[in-house]
Amino acid sequence: MMTGDRLPPTYVEGFHNRDDVMKMKYNRLGNTGLQVSVLGFGASSLGSVFHETDDDEAIQVVYKAIKSGINIIDVAPWYGHGKAETILGQALRDIPRQAYYLTTKVGRYQPKLDEMFDFTAERTMRSVNESLQRLGLNYVDIIQIHDMEFAPNLDVILNDTLWALQRVKDSGKAKFIGITGYPMDNFRIKMSNKNKLTTITGVTISQEKNVAVMNAAPISMGLLSNRGPPSWHPATDDIKDACKEAAKYCQDKGVDISKLAMHFTLDHDEIPTTFVSTASLSILESNLACVHEKLSTLETNTMADVMNRYFRPLGNKTWEGIEVANYWRQLETMKN
């Protein structure tokens, strides 16, 4: 881990706030050779996927995030159905390309059920070109398969999607290939040396065979916030209720549950980077503070109380598989 002893390769003299970059923590991302900030910028909020956002403020958020030492950005065509990439592209016009690494995705696109996913080789290659155009870039650092658990089968991923992404990589439009999703079994798929994965974005998975792990959604897509999750959140009611009660408990103690969630994630040193999304300057400031500041005694005790009172009784329950099952059930109903 780099912590103030030297500047990362993404540092640009005259652009960055040097003191902020020196305070940021950087980790090696698997065997990619990239040195990434422990806090990554998730650009989903730029697509107004959680609530309505101000595009001008969103652009300022991106600019400030990169100047402050965050050097890896995650986005996807799915986020706002092109809006997040478009707004991000506007923000990146005034940011040196050397200053950041960027990952986008293929496979998940439109809200209409029968147009939501397409993992074919043709659509994959076209999607990369569309993303580059929206972003105003010639290449991305990492191209990932978005939620591959929604594919009809893994053969499509292996023979179509990965084949296409290897062509994309060979063309210079991406440097590394990765996958995202929930089911852990999917991450054990075997691939040829030619179609080799280099990154995985998931929730709680271990690093194996030099595959880099990038964490995402430490606030659990709004569950661990005072605002609460969006209506589309796939968690079950008991999980939502537990999170709501936990947030209320924290509020009564004068503690921000989102801050606790951020520290819980960032304290896991084995995770090179964690993407957190916001289009708010004030929330960005709070997220950055989590990298530099320790929890108070009150906050530490409140976290322990919350774990014991609300989360441990759930027995590590998640919403893995729920969204996939609903998708196939609704698709089958639509066909009939």
Image (cartoon, helix red, strand yellow):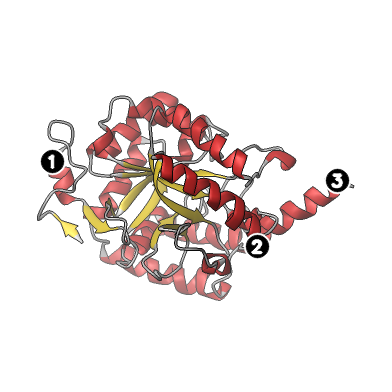
- Which of the two residues, 200 or 58, is positioned nearer the viewer here? 200
At horizontal 63% and vertical 60% (from top left) the residue drawn is: 154
Dot label at residue 321: 2
- Of helix, strand and loop, which one carries label 1? helix
How crowded pointer 2 is (Cα within 10 Å; few <14, some 14-19, many 20+) is rated as some
The residue type indicated by label 3 comes to: Lys
In terms of image quadrants, where is residue 305? bottom left
What x and y, as percent, mark residue 100?
A: 29, 40
- Of helix, strand and loop, which one carries label 3? helix
Q: Earlier in the sequence, mark 1 or mark 2?
A: 1
At horizontal 54% and vertical 52% (from top left) the residue drawn is: 162
The answer to whether the residue labelled 3 contacts the one labelled 2, judged by CB atoms less than 8 Å apart, is: no
The answer to whether residue 285 is left or right of residue 74 is: left
* Residue behind mark 1: 18
Determine if residue 146 is in view: no
The answer to whether residue 63 is left or right of residue 85 is: left
Q: Nearer the viewer, mark 3 or mark 1?
A: 3
Q: Is residue 323 above or below residue 310?
A: above
- Which of the two residues, 305 or 263, is positioned nearer the viewer here? 263
Looking at the rendered image, the quarter that the N terminus falls into is bottom left
What x and y, as percent, mark residue 190?
A: 53, 67
Q: Is residue 254 above or below residue 238?
A: above
What x and y, as percent, mark residue 315?
A: 56, 75
Q: Earlier in the sequence, mark 3 or mark 2?
A: 2
The residue type indicated by label 2 comes to: Gly
Q: Earlier in the sequence, mark 3 or mark 1?
A: 1
* Residue behind mark 3: 335
Q: Nearer the viewer, mark 3 or mark 2?
A: 3
Q: CA distance from mark 1 to mark 2?
A: 44 Å
- Which of the two residues, 130 or 269, is positioned nearer the viewer here? 130
How crowded pointer 3 is (Cα within 10 Å; few <14, some 14-19, many 20+) is rated as few
